[in-house]
Image (cartoon, rainbow, N blue to C red):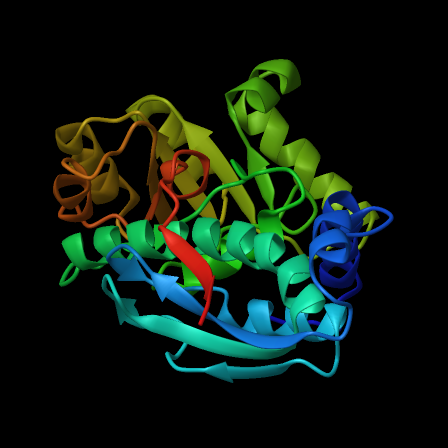
Amino acid sequence: MNFADPQVIQLIELAIAEDIGDGDHSSRGSIPANEQGKARLLVKDTGVICGIHLAEHIFNRIDSTLVFKPHIEEGSHVKFGDVAFIVSGNIHSILQAERLVLNFMQRMSGISTLTKRLVDIIDGTNARLLDTRKTTPGMRIFEKYAVVVGGGTNHRMGLFDMVMLKDNHNDYAGGITAGVNQTKKYLDRHNKQLKIEVETRNLNEVQESLSVGVDRIMFDNFSPEEMKAAVILVDGRCETEASGGITESSIRSYAETGVDFISVGALTHSVQSLDLSLKQF
């Protein structure tokens, strides 16, 4: 993660302002200002740890004199009782950063854990696991980073870095052919080199997408049998993607159809956070 990225800086600053406001009055009221101490991040769950570098950055942003010592590498498999890192220094500073660090790390680690589990299920197939734009507002850059840490692949970051013509686009545009042709003209006029992906609902739409020429075809809510037929129809002429209601129990059957990518919104919109705790010792 690039901590010099203006978007990353802005999001961290917003999180700090949201939580600390005009000061941590609980710590100020109960603990002497110069009191020193240390705390460790305890893992109370099983999964993949994510956000250690971000935690170090947040602690140092709150107080550059804090000493941060990681004990586990980013992306490591962890279990109950593991210590991810130790931080020492001013107790006020540690307590100010505590909830921020936990909020980020628990969610990011949950995403990495689920991602790794699904990646392992489709191991040995041609398919790569993709995330989606179904992310927490303001958290997308962190959540997509967590997908990569878990072994997944990022889809587009937003509406700006790839064209995806979904059913609503195509219906409003007058069909797939009209939508793709109009988009190609638009990209030429604005000198934009963006890939075009089209969502399809049946084999007729897959054939139409092939005829008009696109970079990737998404098979939306196809059964594994329908998807296998669609992959055969495409025959390597463009990239292929499976999407729509794919679960942990069904993902292997989709991967075995020969599809190139499988997108799963649940990686970021329905994830269970990993249980972590920052404790004084």
Q: Nearer the viewer, residue 181 or 9?
A: 9
- Relative to 210, does residue 50 appear above or below in the rendering? below
Residue found at x 74% / y 67%: 32
Expressed as whole percent of the image width and height from the top left, the position of residue 62 reads 74, 68
Expressed as whole percent of the image width and height from the top left, the position of residue 52 reads 49, 71
Q: From the viewer's perspective, is 162 left or right of 134?
A: right
Residue found at x 59% / y 48%: 140
- Relative to 121, does residue 86 appear above or below in the rendering? below
The answer, for residue 212, to whether it is visible in the render is no
- Quadrant assignment for the C terminus: bottom left
Residue found at x 51% / y 35%: 134
Q: Nearer the viewer, residue 221 or 89?
A: 89
Expressed as whole percent of the image width and height from the top left, the position of residue 157 reads 60, 50
The answer, for residue 168, to whether it is visible in the render is yes
Expressed as whole percent of the image width and height from the top left, the position of residue 99 reads 59, 52
How many badges with numbers are in the image?
0
Q: Nearer the viewer, residue 127 or 123?
A: 123
- Kindly indicate the quadrant of the structure image that contains residue 34: bottom right
- Quadrant assignment for the N terminus: bottom right
Residue found at x 51% / y 21%: 167
- Kindly indicate the quadrant of the structure image that contains residue 203: top left
Q: From the viewer's perspective, is 254 left or right of 86?
A: left
| In the image, farthest residue toward the right | 22
Q: From the viewer's perspective, is 86 left or right of 261?
A: right
